[in-house]
């Protein structure tokens, strides 16, 4: 049975790529240039995109393409870069057999190198994991797993076509812990069919009983009459998680105090990127696979999403990048401000403007758009320093959005409040 993420959920932050601003002019050449510019020991993260087909033949072909792409990237990098984190993305990652994952990791070792400090994370379908799978994944060096849970209500699960009782998930988590994989996260969701405030509270309590280190709370983009219902479900889930001892990280992550994410937040090491919130020091993420995204300080570049065209590029010994966007100094400034607000609830605009050599006046419109937030106490502004008091943390994403030129206008944000 497939473990597809409900299509009506809003994209996770790892999926937010402002695709409408991408251009085919920023493609393979731009990617090769960025790869060649990576420093000798610069920390990098790898994001392996896994839209694998159910058939062995299609999976094998895709795997061959993935390894070819790695060889092309490694050639452009000429031995530079230090891999500190690897993320196997895609809710169907376990459609791969463990020996396929092993083959991918062997190629990463050959082309880029691995160390004992490299963390390996895998998105996984809890319904297809056996104890043997857990043992095999541990032997491969997987240190973090994220389970697509969404909700424990039988009525909700039947509507999604993904029945996985709490007992099943509990057994999977126990298996991972027995074999030494302790960093375990759940993706939970609100705004699903048949959900109510009471049912989502019960579902969150069931999740908390299993004690995942982290919980990501996803939901649909609220529209019209649905907005009030989604908001009530979201707030109920957030309240239940915080009441049970989870700290809110960013705007939709929750973590137990001893988890690596919570420690990174306390120590000021929390980072936010297209891959979400993490404690990795990497500023560069290289994406592999169809539709995968690579992120650099001055560019975001996406691979060809069409698998046939992805293969075609690789057959011509070309990097399969299809489109992207150059990030100007002002773009980078705005990204730094957004990162500060989401991770630390505070930013110094003057400091960032000086660093990126951009005039503070470039942010005048964004500062004006903060007026409705300031009037309600969601933010405080003192000279060039913006702070979000802890009670306003849940609004951090909306506050940060005013600094993103692709996000809603002042009027839209005001009505959202």
Image (cartoon, grey):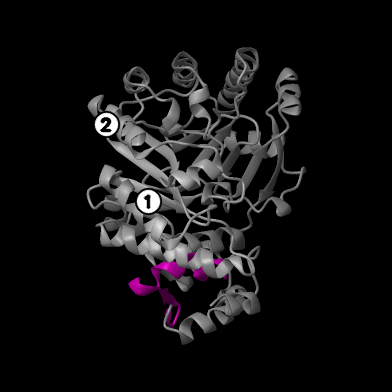
Percent across and percent down for residue 417 are 53, 78
Query: Between tags 2 and 1, which lies in front?
Result: 1
Q: Nearer the viewer, residue 255 or 5?
A: 5
Disc 1 designates what residue?
Answer: 203
- The quarter of the picture where residue 161 lies is top right
Percent across and percent down for residue 334 are 55, 63
Between discs 2 and 1, the one toward the N terminus: 2
The residue located at (59%, 18%) in the rendering is 63
Q: Is residue 259 above or below residue 220?
A: above
Q: Nearer the viewer, residue 42 or 178?
A: 178
- The quarter of the picture where residue 169 lies is top left
Q: Which residues are magenta?
A: 379-403
Question: Farthest residue in the bottom direction?
Answer: 375
Residue 234 seen by the camera: yes
**Crowding near pointer 2: few (<14 within 10 Å), some, many (20+)?**
some
Please indicate whether residue 359 sits to the left or right of residue 165 in the image: right
Q: Secondary structure at mark 2?
A: helix
Residue 283 seen by the camera: no
Q: Quadrant of the N terminus?
A: top right
Please indicate whether residue 359 sits to the left or right of residue 320 in the image: left
The residue located at (65%, 40%) in the rendering is 302
The residue located at (55%, 75%) in the rendering is 360
Disc 2 designates what residue?
Answer: 174
Is 393 part of what is drawn in magenta? yes
The residue located at (44%, 82%) in the rendering is 383
Q: CA distance from mark 2 to mark 1?
A: 19 Å
Is 45 part of what is drawn in magenta? no
**Crowding near pointer 1: few (<14 within 10 Å), some, many (20+)?**
many
Q: Secondary structure at mark 1?
A: helix
Q: Nearer the viewer, residue 127 or 80?
A: 127
């Amino acid at each position: 049975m497939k473990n597809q993420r409900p299509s009506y959920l809003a994209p996770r932050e790892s999926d937010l790529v402002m695709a409408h601003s991408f251009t085919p002019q920023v493609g393979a050449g731009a990617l090769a240039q960025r790869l060649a510019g990576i420093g000798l020991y610069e920390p990098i993260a790898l994001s392996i995109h896994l839209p694998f087909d159910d058939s062995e033949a299609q999976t094998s072909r895709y795997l061959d393409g993935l390894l070819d792409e790695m060889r092309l990237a490694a050639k452009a990098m000429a031995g530079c870069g230090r891999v500190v984190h690897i993320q196997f993305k895609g809710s169907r990652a376990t459609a791969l057999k463990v020996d396929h994952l092993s083959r991918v990791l062997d190629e990463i070792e050959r082309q880029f190198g691995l160390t004992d400090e490299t963390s390996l994370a895998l998105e996984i379908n809890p319904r297809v994991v056996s104890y043997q799978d857990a043992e095999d994944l541990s032997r491969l060096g997987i240190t973090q797993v994220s389970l697509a849970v969404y909700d424990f209500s039988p009525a909700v699960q039947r509507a999604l076509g993904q029945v996985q009782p709490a007992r099943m998930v509990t057994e999977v988590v126990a298996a991972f812990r027995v074999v030494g994989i302790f960093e375990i996260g759940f993706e939970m969701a609100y705004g699903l069919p048949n959900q109510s405030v009471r049912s989502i509270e019960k579902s969150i309590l069931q999740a908390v009983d299993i004690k995942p280190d982290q919980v990501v709370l996803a939901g649909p983009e609220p529209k019209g009459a649905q907005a009030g219902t989604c908001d009530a479900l979201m707030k109920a889930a957030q309240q239940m998680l915080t009441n049970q001892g989870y700290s809110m990280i960013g705007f939709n992550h929750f973590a137990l105090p001893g988890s690596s994410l919570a420690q990174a937040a306390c120590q000021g090491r929390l980072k936010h990127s297209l891959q979400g919130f993490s404690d990795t020091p990497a500023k560069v993420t290289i994406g592999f696979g169809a539709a995968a995204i690579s992120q650099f300080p001055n560019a975001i570049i996406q691979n060809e999403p069409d698998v046939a065209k992805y293969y075609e590029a690789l057959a011509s010994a070309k990097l399969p990048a299809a489109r992207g966007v150059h990030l100007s100094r002002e773009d980078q400034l705005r990204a730094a401000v957004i990162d500060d607000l989401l991770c630390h609830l505070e930013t110094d605009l003057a400091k960032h403007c000086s660093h990126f050599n951009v005039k503070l006046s470039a942010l005048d419109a964004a500062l004006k758009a903060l007026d409705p937030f300031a009037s309600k106490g969601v933010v405080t502004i003192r000279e060039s320093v913006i702070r979000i008091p802890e009670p306003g943390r849940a609004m951090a994403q909306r506050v940060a959005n005013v600094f993103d030129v692709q996000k809603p206008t002042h009027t839209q944000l005001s009505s959202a409040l």
